[in-house]
Amino acid sequence: MKKSEFYKTILINAVFIGIALVSIELLARILTQARVDASKPIRSIRSIPSALLNRGGDWNNHLNQSNIQRKPYPYLMFKGAPNAADHNYLGYRISDPITRNTINIALFGGSTGYQGSPPILNLLTQKLNTLKSDTKYAPLNFSVVSSNHNQHLHSILENYNEYPIDIIVFYGGYNETFQTALYDPRPGYPYNFQVRNEMSPEEMFLRKHFVLYAIIQKHLNKFSLKPFTSNWNKKIVENYIKTIDAARLISESLTTGRCKTPFLFIYQPYQIPEKVPALFRDQVHVNIKSYAISSKDGIDVSDSLNEYQSEYLDGVHLSQSGRNIVAQEIFESNTFIEAVKSCKN
């Protein structure tokens, strides 16, 4: 075979392979978007959101490190950008100044603790301040979108000397369980740690621009723990309880000492999709729920919206009236009432 024919054959094959890859990539994008929003049929390529076409699966919302709600930060992995939106100089939704003139309740949560006008913590302190008492209460909202309780342990250490903290509250459950299955299956690992922190620049480029690569990567998952299996479920619960135990010990040491009960943890409401294996409900949800109920400093509000399903904006985020319902249930909890009563200003 002549060299010219040889090179021609290679060129033709390369063109066909290129066309095949582009076709598969476009098909992957169309099918991915169809699963994301089956209620809106795709009529043309232009109808596919640019976030999906150009960012390999919603890069702007989930992986862009310039996002002001998930700004990279040492030890914590990420937190809110300082002095952006309504964040204070530390990057949290806290209204300074906070002094020892009030009993200060610090809440550490994910987006469900961060969001709201006002957030759940502020609803609680507002209710406390309507009581006929000389004691006043102030909210310290250290919640960060997508963060989990393992990160909140580090957040306590980073922030305890910034304010006089009297009670520490861990509010969550979803990011410590279900979110783990979606973004990085290793129990306790930060959200999207594999992509944000472990990928090489070359992998980052492919993950950012090609849906096909993201699909292949998902199916070639290198992690030994598979979400929703019995072993994964067990590890998730073990990590949750271990983290709560550590937070309890840290809180006893790093709060002001003005409250005899310096730590509370709240297991939040969220929806478990029908397609999720029943083992998750039986081995994770039920066990964490039982742990919260049986703990002297635990509060279970996971059933608070059972009769108000319309208050869910998605599987975990709530409308403002939904937040009001949850805050009211926490406020009426004997565990919460006794913790607040244990404080002396």
Image: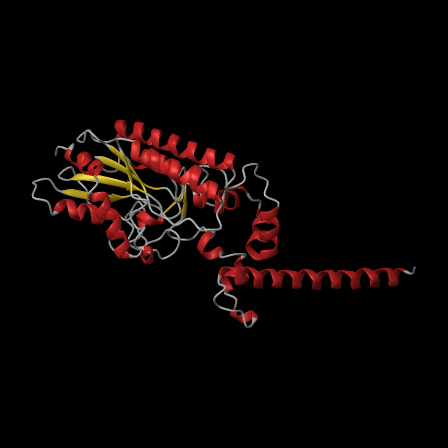
Indicate the position of residue 219 as horizontal and vertical percent values: 60, 47
Question: Residue 137, located in which quarter of the rendered image?
Answer: top left
Q: Position of residue 144 (x, y in %)?
A: 35, 46
Left or right, residue 218 beside residue 301 = right
Relative to 274, 110 lies left or right: left
In-front residue for pair 93/343: 343
The residue at 49%/38% (across/down) is 186
For the rendered model, the colour scheme is secondary structure
Residue in the picture at 31% in, 27% down: 249
Give whichever of 49, 176 is nearer the camera.
Answer: 176
Location of the C terminus (image quadrant): top left
* Rendered-image quadrant of the N terminus: bottom right
Taking the spot 21% from the left edge, 48% from the top edge, the residue there is 328
Residue 84: x %, y % from top left: 32, 53
Q: Residue at x 31, y 47 (%)?
A: 113
The answer to whether one can see residue 82 in this image is no
Residue 3 in picture, x, y percent from top left: 89, 60
> Which of the 4 image quadrants contains residue 76?
top left
Residue 46 placement: quadrant: bottom right
